[in-house]
Image (cartoon, rainbow, N blue to C red):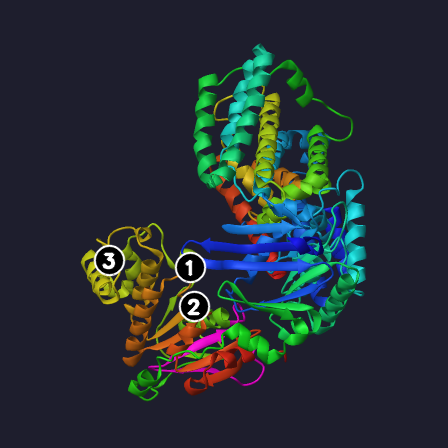
Amino acid sequence: MPEGDADIIRLNGAEKHFGAVRALGGVDFHVRRGECVGLVGHNGAGKSTLMHMVAGTLTPDSGKIGVHGGVEDNYSVSRAQKRGIRCVFQELSLCPNLSVAENTRINHASLSGLGWRRKAAALITAKLDEIFPDHGISAWDIVGDLSIGRRQMVEVARAFTVTQDRLDLVILDEPTSSLDAHTAGQLLAFVRRFIAGGKSCILISHVLGEVLRNADRIVVMRDGKVVVADAASAFDRDRLVTAMGGAEARQKIAAEIAAARPAAGPLRVRARAAAQKDGADLVARAGEIIGLAGLAGHGQTDLLLAIFAAASRARTGIEVTAPVALVAGDRQSDGIFPQWSIAENIGIRSLARLRNGLLISPRREAELAEFWQKKIGIRTPDMNNNIFSLSGGNQQKALFARALGSDAQIVLMDDPMRGVDIGTKLEVYDLVREEAGRGRTFLWYTTETEELDNCDHVYVFKNGRIVANLGRDELTEEKIIQSSFGDAA
Amino acid sequence: MRPEMTAASLEATARSSAERGALARARLLRGLLPALSLALVLLAIAWLNPRAISYFGFSLMLNLAIPIALATIAQMFVISGNELDLSIGTFVGFVGCVTATWLKDAPLIGVAILLGSIGVYALLGALIHLRNLPSIVVTLGMSFVWQGLAILVLPKPGGKAPDWLLAIMSFKPPFVPFPIIAALLIGLVVHFGLMRTSYGVILRGSGGNPAALKRAGWSLLRTKIVLFALAGLFGVLSGMALIGITTSADANIGNGYTLLSIAGVILGGGEFVGGRVSPIGAVIGALTLALAASPLLTFMHIPPDWQVAANGAILIIVLAARVLISRRER
């Protein structure tokens, strides 16, 4: 690496697979001294995986990592910290049960011995004062008592504190997501001072304006690859959005299905998100497939859960007129009963119909399971096998069978296709469209934009609110990205 | 309760943000709850039987408070790391049997056995971490192992405590009864060790956010081993203190301590997960339980047959009050 001396970190051909899913496919990435690199891309584009590698929390399956010009063979978190590389992770990594000063101590092994509490408090207070004047945080506040914004301030300030080890590069993963405009401005101003002092930063943000204004160079990722890397001045909003979304026009499966569908039926769901200030409602009618889009964690799941709760107990702002079933996204923790057989897992939503007197009829349970095994193609020799004998995709099919086999006329889907192979996906898409044709209503939250092509209507969410309502004919990936990355909020 | 906690709460209130003020008040209330419940039990006793509030009365009523407090502290270390120890009761019984036999007759072997049992605790911590096993299952299994070993050591009730141990436990300081001094000492020493030292922060952090600790380069294996070894150490101290009071042992002597210790930790302001524990609170919780366990109920003329149930009712009331206060914190 001839230019190695100027590079703080350099990754060549980094690859990472999680099971069958490719998270990173041969990425070259580097950060020079005194530069702020902006990193943008969709959810699942591989940004976080790449940053975990830079920070040493993940090791690549193949590829090389070099730091300060030297090749690192056993790169790890502690090695990264010794070499001056820190990361502020997106999910908060503070201990909520400890005070601000105690959390600072966790990142500095040298803060020990007599008087360590005083030293730690002075260290973090000085850095908070420097980055966020008038922050209003005491070093003795218990982190769990602080608002989410203040926690983020502590976390950011902590990453910039220095005791023994050098500090050259700080990775800021969505550092402003919980900050208001004022504190976000303070932070970005500090980052620019930090860069001017000859240090480096990687800035990951979904607020594109923030990246355009503050980065020297911008790297765009998509599908586990770097698609463009150029000076920030060479980009504008539109070019970034195009690069992130993929310029090639996608085939739409949709038109003929839309034509084949009956006209909108009676109202099934009318719901308003808790954070919604204007009058925008989510409206779903019988026979409709409604998409919930936007970046992950912007209130889509919350609204689905609120609708689910409203079905059994009335809630203000939400109207539900038919039985509801939910297909959970995180099937391991929310969907599957691990000790049960496939048949039992399918039957649980329909126990009332499977009853024979006071007991569950095994015969009816088996019939239901068998029907759905054929219908949805669950690949197993015996439906009485444990649910874990199935592959991930087939487990998800069993969860769909649970919802579709029930009396529910409204099916809520919470990003159910994560980590499911494409074959299974296509089968389930067909099934969803077929069931919608029979008058069932689907509310479908997905992080995969292609899946929205199956929907009649798409609501785009941002910060817990509906910011756009796109009909099928207006539905393009650019539109969705534009709305969900809007800088307005 | 915890000085830095109340100090932080006061500072937060001073900053006059209404929301944080309310939070701080709720936290303060929760911090004071163990002390309040102890005061309540004491008031009830004083009202029912004023003569009990005396040097002699406290020495008698708090007789068994020291081993309960030590066992509660042992449990608290395990809970700090988001685990639960269901074997502490039978472990205390096992230690008691060793103390009344080997430690008196062959002190060297006795000491070796007790140190070895602390080592076993440390290994359990390692096993639970490395194999990612549920601590409830492992320690439930171990509770039968300890019980079996106790019966092997002492097939029928008997044995005798070493003289030096009897001397320590029957120590009569002027003015303040020994159990109160011992409880204060235990609370303060553990408070300093766990709440004030720099490694204590790491131990508590391992319960608060293990992933963050790992990212910062700390070994979670080590924290778990240390926490379990500390639990073993305080379990040994509890068993020895118990035999110092009862003078002889029985393989079943500590069986009630498992649930008492868990209740003491929770009563003292600790939580099952999240590394939120309070050593001083735990000791106060143990004192409250020791008083509520039999003196209070005896004074209330509740027949012994009903005392266990009454004990449970008191626990439910106090823990329910805690839940209500915690809910306001959310």
Task: Tell me if mark 2 has few (under 14), some (14-19) or many (20+) residues whose alpha carbon lies within 10 angstroms of its own.
Answer: many
Pointer 2 with pointer 1, Cβ within 8 A: yes
CA gap, disc 2 and disc 1 = 11 Å
Image mark for residue A414: 2
Tell me which numbered mark, 1 or 3, is placed earlier along the sequence: 1
Q: Nearer the viewer, mark 2 or mark 1?
A: 2
Above or below, comparing residue B75 to residue A92 in the picture: above
A87 or A144: nearer the viewer: A87
Q: Label 2 sits on what residue type?
A: Asp
Q: Label 3 sits on what residue type?
A: Ile
Residue beneath label 3, please? Answer: A360
Q: Are marks 2 and 1 on the same chain?
A: yes
Name the secondary structure under disc 1: helix
Q: Position of residue A405 (x, y in %)?
A: 27, 68
Magenta residues, start to end:
A276-299
CA gap, disc 3 and disc 2 = 29 Å
Residue beneath label 1, please? Answer: A334
Q: Would you say residue A273 is visible in this rendering?
A: no
Task: Tell me if mark 3 has few (under 14), some (14-19) or many (20+) residues whose alpha carbon lies within 10 angstroms of its own.
Answer: some
At 60% from the left and 59% from the top, the residue drawn is A29
Q: Position of residue A187 (x, y in %)?
A: 73, 66
